[in-house]
Image (cartoon, helix red, strand yellow):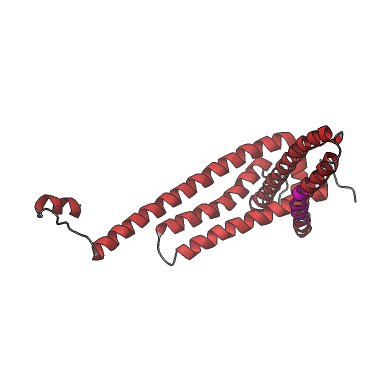
Amino acid sequence: DIRTRVQAQVPLPQGYHVEYGGQFESGESAARNLVLMGLGAIAGVATTIVKFLLTIFFAWLCLVLVRERMVHATERMGRDFGKSFLWGLLGWGAMIVAIPAVAIVGAIAIVILCITIIGIPVAILLAIALVFALMGTVLAIVAGAFLGYLNGAMYVGQRLFSGGVPGRVSPIRAIIFGALLNMGLKILGDLLGFVGVVFLMPIGIAFGIAAAVLGIVLTTAGLGAMILTRFSRGPEVG
């Protein structure tokens, strides 16, 4: 290191010091930025891998519990992807409205009950019930979104690797393939950003955006397919 060599070989009078600038300072700053970018890219890749492993674990758990319903919804996606996507958008809208609607209705009921002394104990119980209702609504939204994503990943995996033969790829393998495609785009974007070459950074950002858009579209269509099939096991009616 040049700093160590200068300190060892160049004695300075008391009160004097050496300042480093120019190309040395620029090179040192660039090296520091490169290290930070590398750590950020490694953290992003590691986070994506952990998310992928957790996704596959919970996908396996969901298939154990509701395999037929998920397969049925995915088959509906294959027949009516556009319709599934539109119903998914309606589903997202309903979810967005659900939380404030539950909160507002519950708050109004609590205020009305608090007007009378007799209604105060009931209002307290209602407030507790409102908290649990909100928690249940949030959990239902998270579960619905996750199942929608799994349905979308299964749809992609079957489309890409089944060769048009129904049942050729098992549901868990189809989900793995679909999730790998989606998360692989994100990892590729992180790696291209880590390279640091100017013309590659926009490509890396584009891959990251593509992964996000693909995930949103597949999740929305998967959610809509569950709505269309009423998340049932058997053939649809009508």
Q: Is residue 78 above or below residue 234?
A: below
Q: Nearer the viewer, residue 134 or 226?
A: 134
Q: Is residue 65 left or right of residue 120?
A: left
Q: Is residue 31 above or below residue 62?
A: below
Percent x, y for residue 1?
20, 52
Membership of 198 in magenta stretch: no
Q: Is residue 78 visible?
A: no
Q: Nearer the viewer, residue 123 or 87?
A: 123
* Residue extending farthest bottom: 199
* Residue extending farthest right: 238
Q: Is residue 157 above or below residue 207?
A: above
The region drawn magenta spans 90-100
Percent x, y for residue 141?
72, 45
Q: Nearer the viewer, residue 51 or 71?
A: 51
Residue at horizontal 22 percent and vertical 60 percent from the top: 20
Percent x, y for residue 165?
71, 49
Magenta: main secondary structure equals helix
Q: Is residue 160 visible?
A: yes
Membership of 93 in magenta stretch: yes
Residue at horizontal 77 percent and vertical 46 percent from the top: 103
Percent x, y for residue 149?
67, 48
Number of marks: 0
Q: Nearer the viewer, residue 32 or 223?
A: 32
Q: Is residue 56 left or right of residue 205?
A: right
